[in-house]
Image (spheres, rainbow, N blue to C red):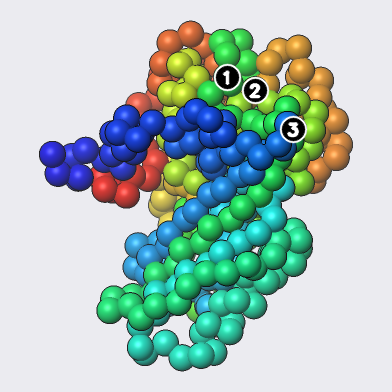
Amino acid sequence: MKLAALGEFDLIERIKKSYGSEGGRIVRGMGDDAAALKVDTDSLVLTTTDMLLENVHFDLKYFSPYNLGKKAIAVNISDIAAMGGSPQWILTSLGLPESVDGSFVEQFYKGMSCLSDRFGIKLIGGDTVASKGGVVINVQLIGTVNQKELILRRGARAGDHVFVTGTLGDSSAGLEILKKGLWGEKKRDEYVDSVNRHLTPSPRVDEARYLAAGEVASSMIDISDGLVQDLNHICTESNVQGKLLIDDVPISDSYKYVCNEMGLNSHLSLCGGEDYELLFTVPPDKIGFVDSFREQFSCGVTRIGEICHGNGVSVYDEQNNPVELEVCGYDHFKN
């Protein structure tokens, strides 16, 4: 079967069945934001890796080398955060065309340092090779977490509430601004927030650690593929159904303006991806903890639905009518 028909996630499932994913020191293998490995009685090592390809994940017409470095590490930090962990060490491999000069590499690592210094992450190695195509970036990030604070995708249960941090859709709106060539020397104030959310996402490490330390989230994931798609990942691993209320999904004033101005599909907040916010479920008896979260962090947190018996994800409007969506979320082989 061709990959275009199989799809990214079915391909991953086939690999999991071939290799297995747990046992021995492997507490959690394939199927989550990072692998969790047991090193002693209480501590786990988390490790994740992401590959970014020029003209697939980024376009150098939009990204400066500095911002590209920031985003390359941010998407990995977000994976470690989504499991309640603390990022610690990073390895970076670059495939570079001969046309790239030394200043590109210097600025790329300066961008990485901006976030790695903020979170206390140390660069411990990597590789550099010549690329016959575009720029290729592979980042591996290693983190740690106390075993009792580990948050997986598979812990959601019927009756849990679904929450999300921040606002959604901004990154996708920002990408549309860039693709349409509307980000020139005269930058419109209404576009700034959306474009920045796409170029330089900010992973929610402190927020995730707060949830992990309080042992309040029954499951969690970061929003990289899109809200509906990523909630479906939780539902698949937990064998439950997610019910989303479309009118409760938090969106920013910038997102509203861009969608209205450019005639964009308002479902970008459900399907756009690359927001890198936290999507998590909370049992009813721990809802009170969310109020303390709101007091602690300025990003905001919003209840957007609930977990039910069943499977998959359903979306409803404020009259409780089902909302039909077209292709929703990103799949490397189907999109």
Q: Is residue 237 visible?
A: yes
- The residue that label 3 is drawn on is 42
Tell me: residue 296, above or below residue 89: above
Quadrant in the rendering for residue 41: top right
The residue tagged with tag 2: helix, strand or loop? loop
Amino acid identity at mark 3: Asp
Side of 248 where 330 appears, left or right: left
Circle 1/circle 3 CB separation < 8 Å: no
Side of 293 where 237 appears, left or right: left
Q: Residue 243 in the image: state x and y as whole percent.
A: 50, 19
- The residue that label 2 is drawn on is 218
How far apart in space, not on screen, are marks 1 and 2 (Cα)?
5 Å
The residue tagged with tag 1: helix, strand or loop? loop
Q: Residue furthest left?
A: 1
Q: Residue 248 in the image: state x and y as whole percent.
A: 60, 29
How far apart in space, not on screen, are marks 1 and 3 (Cα)?
23 Å
